[in-house]
Amino acid sequence: MSDGHDSADIDSDEPLLKGISPEPDPSIEEYYQLQQELVLLTLFLAVVIFVPVWMVYSLNIAFNCLIGACVGVVYLKMLAKGVEQLGRQKAKVGKNQLALFIGLILVASQLEPLHIIPIFLGFLTYKVAIIVSIFRSSSSILSEFL
């Protein structure tokens, strides 16, 4: 008994779903790898910064920096999601990321144990991670030429 489909009718070289590539685009894979590297590097830097701030200032200030860094990671993930949707679903990156930052600063200004400056500096940890990543990639590119 046959189900009406002959195995000779199906060409195994063609993808079953048109428009979907059987292999992922290498540039997308590289983008996701960079995104993951930046998140992990930001978290690593937040922990590395936490200890000296705790020793020099106080545990409260160190936790403020850590809170800012964690919100910075969320900001980075939101930004990455917006960039990923650029061109396919959106024409520009949304302003939700800015609302997150403004909300963080407003909460820090209203709650007594939170301090704006350490939270803001902790928030900027993701930018330090971006700079470190740029230096790492540019040094590897330079070493290839030398």
Image (tube, rainbow, N blue to C red):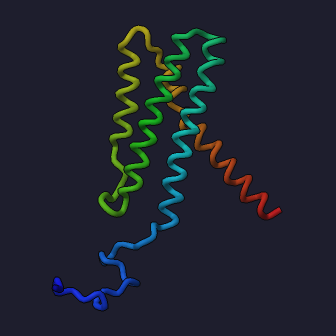
Residue 24 lies, in percent from the top left, at: 45, 66
At horizontal 40% and vertical 55% (from top left) the residue drawn is 84
Q: Could you tell me residue 42's position as x and y percent?
A: 55, 36
Q: Is residue 50 left or right of residue 6?
A: right
Q: Most extreme residue toward the front, as rendered?
A: 1
Q: Camera-side residue: 59 or 15?
A: 15
Quadrant of residue 121 in the image? top right
Percent of width and height locating residue 118: 53, 20
- Residue at screen point 59% across, 39% down: 129
On screen, residue 2 versus residue 66, left or right, reads left
Quarter of the image for residue 1 reads bottom left
As drawn, 21 above or below 84: below
Q: State the image coordinates of residue 20 (x, y, percent, origin top left).
A: 35, 72
Most distant residue in the bottom direction: 8
Front-lying residue, 48 or 12 = 12
Q: Is residue 9 left or right of residue 79?
A: left
Q: In which quadrant will I find the C terminus?
A: bottom right
Residue at image coords 51%, 64%: 27
119 relative to 129, above or below: above
Residue at the spot x=37%, y=83% of the render? 14
The answer to whether residue 146 is above or below residue 46 is below
